[in-house]
Amino acid sequence: MGKRAIGWGVLCLLALLAGAQEDARQSTGSKILAVESVWNQAEARGDIKALNLIFDESLVYVDEDGTMLTKAQFFARVKSAGSRPQSLVTPAMNVQIYGGTAIVTGTYHAGGVEKGKPFQRNGRFIDIWVYNNGVWLCVAAQATPISR
Amino acid sequence: MRLIIALYFFPLLFASRLPAQANTSAQTAEATVLMLENAWNQAVRLGESKTLQELFVDGLVYIDYDGEIMNKGQYLAHVQKFLLHPEYVVAESMQAHAYGQSVVVTGVYRKKGTKNGQPYALRERFVDTWIQQKGAWVCASSQSTLISH
């Protein structure tokens, strides 16, 4: 086999590997977005068991008013039905993957009743996911209301 | 003045370019990233866009306290605008948590300045995500939320 043939072979192999890597990245992105959707449903139902599988023990959750919650504090809040939004829609989500770290950005519309008053809020969020022991876990989540 | 700035930032930039070692401890990673957070604050105050360029991935996602979303180019332009209006940025607290090849930093800033012609003085909670890329720690996402309680 000539040097040129070997060169073409290496190029084809690299192209295949790059393609496989891109496929793997897309597949990972899709999986994480699917878990984001499960999160929304679990939070709306107050399903702590499901949420427990999504978050790392070190979770840092920053709410729309700047309050910082640990995993336990976030779960306590989800359990309290009065503080859950009755509807939570995330119309746009994007995921960027950097090795074992994934960054999900998106917008949300939340609606419900708080202290007896109806509310509608729009905001942006970033969720940080880390691959650990074969699973993707959310380690940080933050929401910011859109005010402009 | 430029020399002073260059001398100040040189060790910080050097730190960001240290080769990634497989056995780098989480503590070293956290300390390096906290140092880069301080370099970022200084660079914002001084409008050092060259320093800022080095601190972010090209795909940076930046969400400001009012929900405005910016990419790297937009954020750098945004910082340049601040040069026209003196401002201060003070970190009240900062904690870093390493997860292998990434570090998540949380903290609280006090800021004063002008945005879109409107003066502001605020406290905000932020979460920044740093990753290792080509042996350097670079920020991939940053988000702030006003502390309103």
Image (spheres, rainbow, N blue to C red):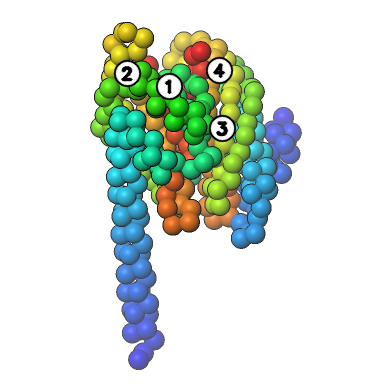
Q: Are marks 1 and 2 in contact (CB under 8 Å)?
A: yes
Q: Chain letter for mark 3, please.
A: B
Q: Secondary structure at mark 2?
A: strand
Give the residue at x 48% y 43%: A56
- B29 to the left or right of A29: right
Disc 3 marks a residue whose amino acid type is: Thr
Mark 1 vs 2, N-terminal side: 1
Q: CA distance from mark 1 to mark 3?
A: 15 Å
Q: Could one spot residue A135 in this view of the protein?
A: yes
> Measured from the top left, where is residue A74 in percent x and y?
46, 29
Query: Viewer-proximal residue, B138 or A109?
Result: A109
In the picture, the disc for residue B123 is 4
Q: Amino acid at mark 2?
A: Arg
Q: Residue at x 30, y 14 (%)?
A: A113
Q: Residues within 10 Å of mark 2 (few under 14, many from 20)?
A: some
User: B132 or B102: nearer the eye?
Assistant: B102
Dot 2 corresponds to which residue? A121
The mark found on residue B106 in the picture is 3
Q: Which mark is residue A64?
A: 1
Question: Which chain contains the residue that carries disc 4?
Answer: B
* Chain letter of disc 1 in the image: A
Label 1 neighbour load within 10 Å: few <14, some 14-19, many 20+: many
Front-lying residue, B112 or A100: A100
The answer to whether residue B103 is left or right of residue A86 is right
Question: Mark 3 packing: few (<14 Cα in 10 Å), some, or many (20+)?
Answer: many
- Label 1 sits on a secondary structure element that is loop
Distance from Cα at disc 1 to Cα at disc 2 = 10 Å
Cα gap from disc 3 to disc 4, whole angstroms? 13 Å
**Kind of residue at badge 4:** Arg
Q: Residues within 10 Å of mark 4 (few under 14, many from 20)?
A: many
C-alpha separation, residue under disc 3 versus residue under disc 2: 24 Å
